[in-house]
Image: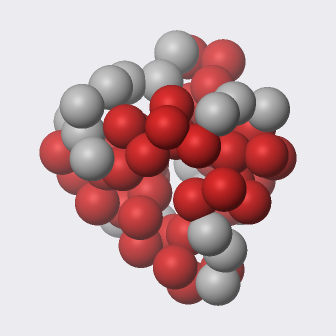
Amino acid sequence: MEIFAKRLKELRKEKGLTQQQIADMLNVRQQSYTRYELNTSEPSYDMLVRIATIFEVSTDYLLGIADY
């Protein structure tokens, strides 16, 4: 899920948010969120949906299935 990690980081930077701020929104530790951006951990389905909701994108976009 390398594309997921790349898009996640890009979306966070576009919003001007820190990893800690996103982690707080997701109710996880910053280390857990950082692992998603580093591609060393994958989110659960529920977490993926929460991330998509925060960034107002589809899960397909996050996963690299769609480019919109």
Is 66 in front, or is 20? 20
Is 44 left, or right, of 10 in this rendering?
Answer: right
Q: Residue at x 75, y 37 (%)?
A: 26
Q: Quadrant of residue 21?
A: bottom right
Q: Nearer the viewer, residue 30 or 15?
A: 30
Name the residue: 64% across, 84% down. Answer: 16
Residue at 69% x, 30% y: name it: 28
Residue 41 image offset from top left, x and y in percent: 32, 26
**Nearer to us in this view, 39 or 62:** 39
- Residue 49 is situated, as x and y percent measured from the top left of the image, at 66, 31
Q: Is residue 6 above or below residue 44?
A: below
Q: Position of 15 compared to 41: left or right?
A: right
Looking at the image, residue 48 lies above or below residue 55: above
> Would you identify the image quadrant in which residue 6 lies?
bottom left
In x, y percent, where is residue 27?
A: 79, 32
Q: Position of residue 46 (x, y in %)?
A: 66, 18
In the drawing, does residue 47 fall left or right of residue 1?
Answer: right
- Which residue is painted at 24% across and 39% down in the image? 39
Seen in the image, is 40 located left or right of residue 54?
left
Q: Please indicate, yes or no, whether residue 28 appears anywhere in the rendered image.
A: yes
In the picture, the quarter occupied by the N terminus is top left
Display colour scheme = secondary structure
Number of marks in picture: 0
Placement of 62 over or under 48, stated as above or below: below
For the question of whether residue 60 can be seen, the reply is: no
